[in-house]
Image (cartoon, coloured by chain):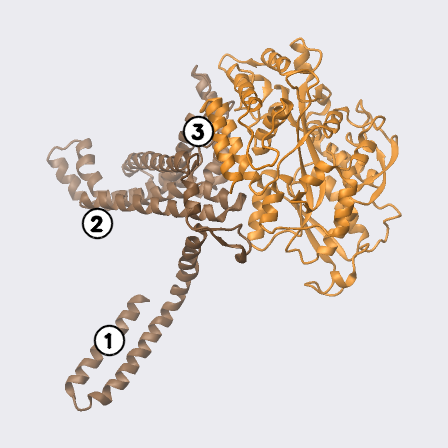
Chain colours: A brown, B orange
Amino acid sequence: MARCGRAGRGTARRGTAPRSAASSGTATAGRGPARAAQRRQTVIAYLFLTPTLLFFAVFLALPLLFAVLLAQSRWAGFNLADIEPVGLDNFTDLFAQGSTFLTPILTNTLLYAIGTVVIALSGSVVIANCINNLRFQGVWRTLYFLPIVTTVVAVGNVWKYMYEPGGLVNGALNALGLPSVAFLQDPDTALPSVVAVQAWASVGTAILILTAGLKSIPETYYEAAELDGADQFTIFWRITLPLLRPSLLFVCITQFITGLQSFALINVMTGDGGPGDATNVAALEIYQQAFTYGDWGVAGAAAFVLFLVIALITMAQLWLFRRKGEDA
Amino acid sequence: MRRREFGAGATAALLAATGCGAPEDAGVDDGGVDDSAVEGRGSRPGSPIVLTLLSHYASEPLKSALQSAVDAWNATHRRVKVRTTAVKFTDLLTTYMVRQAAGQGADILHPYCLWTGQLVQAGVLRPAPPEAVRRIRRDFSPAAVTASSVHGTVYGYPTEVQTYALFYNRRLLRAAGYSGPPRTWRELEEAAYRTARRDRHGNTLVQGFGLSRFDDSTVVGQTLALLAARGGSLLTPDGRWTAIDSAAGRDVFDLERRLIDRGASDTGSTLPKAFPSGQVAMAISAGWWTAVLRGLMGRAYRDVGVAPVPGLAAGDRGTLATGFLLGVNSRCRHPEAAWEFLRWLNAVPVPARARGGDNGRGRDGDRGGDSGRQVSVTRMSALQVSVGSMTGRADDMRALLGPGSGSDPNLGPFLDALRYADPEPNGPRAQRVKSLLRKNIETVWTGRRSVDEALRLATRQLNQELGR
């Protein structure tokens, strides 16, 4: 749509110039219709763009502006006339002494995202590489993709039961002669336990993207490396991994953003982020503030902070990969 | 099967108790509701008005009990029909907030009184009309009226009052050498340690004292009940500051921490499942649990006893009272009809049999038949007692649960507690305060923070919220 608009304007300019050069005497007379045609084409271009612009205005610009307004207001969420401006009070409350937003909520959010990305990425690189060397690759990919098409409520509940004191995981530990672990009840193990499930659930997407990335690496590199006598580890480290970097960058960024924003799994597995605040993350806190406590101002301010964190981390990731020579 | 029988029994008892379909209601129109008021605004002339009622009565026996009452209304009222919907209690507040934000709030709401301040501040609840206010102030206990009010304005009929007491398993206590429930904290601790058992892997077989992490209400409810029994309170009398960082607060946190450290409590266990399975010797919960346990445990319910929450000394009394109200949404298009339905349900006495609480069964579980005194109580009082709960109408409760009523004797301590229980605060940030308190209690339970640190942090956080 945008290309159409630009092409239209370009054609109009190209069309006007020769006419002006050919007949300077009729320039004044000719400029009028040419301008009118250009205006008409511009209008038509914007008309084509209107649905997209409207979509962005309604679903992006307006909510963004409203979020900015809410972050500086006190509002219960129902009547627009009740919005009460409070300046930066909501931000002050978020970072006040005794507030749990910075620690442990924001810290948990980062640990949750980092843990998920590290486990899912490293696991998926290894698994994708294995799948790439196996027969029936489609079957393997489908198997690993199954958690993605399973609802998060089902995934969360099944794992919750598996983690319970008398559950499957503790049963296996007991069978090995090990004591039971209170996975979701102990604040030291609760977050890692949920991170493991989130990583398990998101590994399928990463595998799908990485296997596609692996297939795009030309075979000639591997043949040359084998002729030079490189072993499997050297081939993986020197050829596969560097050439897989575009796919890795994509997986890394998208998984990180998902990790920073997700809360449904935590909501299912530990309720409101317990025990204490051990598994509470920013998105869950935003949801609770808005929809449970009716404090849309604090929720808006917290959402803004989360947005800044995501933007900063994404820029840092892009910068890091670009330094390594990868253009996103 | 047992649950189904229980549900059917509850429904039958309710219908019998409230005299549903009785001649005095037959053919009644929408008593007192002006037809011009119920027609016109959004409804086609001739078509009935349909009011929606959203509650947390999503499971048996509550679901059938409420539905039976609503069916009775619908059967006898042509112009106004009521349709019930329900969600789990843990989802109720969020559902109210989300549906209201989406412009799809129910006409009649059944919120926890803790949320009254928040819902009023958000403009969700409509003040009760003057006639309803007069009736509520006249007929309900002051604690119930206070719980349904904000700054002196009444927002609905107090439908349910819950007090907290100590549930104990007679069989487990007897096996440990105790003939009765503990009366002091010292006795409670001793009994908890002696009844607790674990297997060689450290898995809990029996908890001496169950500490539930199920939701805010269970975590905070049991702690505040112990706090009240110790003579403490959550807030200062003016409600502006928290009083949790006190000697009483420290004693309660210390007691809970000790019970966990010494293996008498396992917060990883699910109390609502473990107690009915005979894996918990003692636990503190609200009166509604009696009906749930009766439904789940069948004959084993004979082993369940209820006693007042123990205090420091025998005879010390104190506990927590919570409740629910039935109010009308500020966006309801037919408020007159909604208030009329609520009057019919909560304020009109009808003949009933005083045999509630055991759904027609006598003390020993045998069928009571038509035995039981004839009393005159509201439909809601009969409904609540039939599911093992209570309303704030003291006269109704005395008539239905008093001596000679044949009701479940386990309901007695909850009725007695109405006299001395502290009501739960219901300010605009009450739910947030409760959530923060829960998290701080859990940090003590899990050993994340010492009792002193948790009390200090809780005080800072709660005061910040109360000051907002």
Check if mark 1's residue and mark 2's residue have beta carbons within 8 Å.
no
Q: Which residue is mark 2?
A: A327
Say what amino acid the circle numbered 2 marks.
Asp
Q: Residue at x 71, y 50 (%)?
A: B128
Residue nearest the viewer, comparing A139 with B157: B157
- Of mark 1 and mark 3, the one earlier in the sequence is 1
Q: Is residue A163 visible?
A: no
In the rendering, at what x and y percent does residue A190 appear?
A: 44, 29
* Marks 1 and 3 on same chain: yes
As drawn, the label of residue A190 is 3
CA gap, disc 1 and disc 3: 63 Å
- The residue lying toward the viewer, choosing from B112 and A194, is B112
Give amino acid for label 1.
Thr
The residue at the point 35 percent across, 34 percent down is A115
Q: How far apart are labels 3 and 2 at the CA level?
A: 38 Å
Q: Position of residue B110 (x, y in %)?
A: 66, 44
* Residue highlighted by disc 1: A11
Q: Residue furthest top?
A: B177
Q: Amino acid at mark 3?
A: Ala
Determine the CA span between mark 1 and mark 2.
32 Å
Which of discs 1 and 3 lies nearer the camera? The answer is 3
Question: Residue farthest to the bottom?
Answer: A25
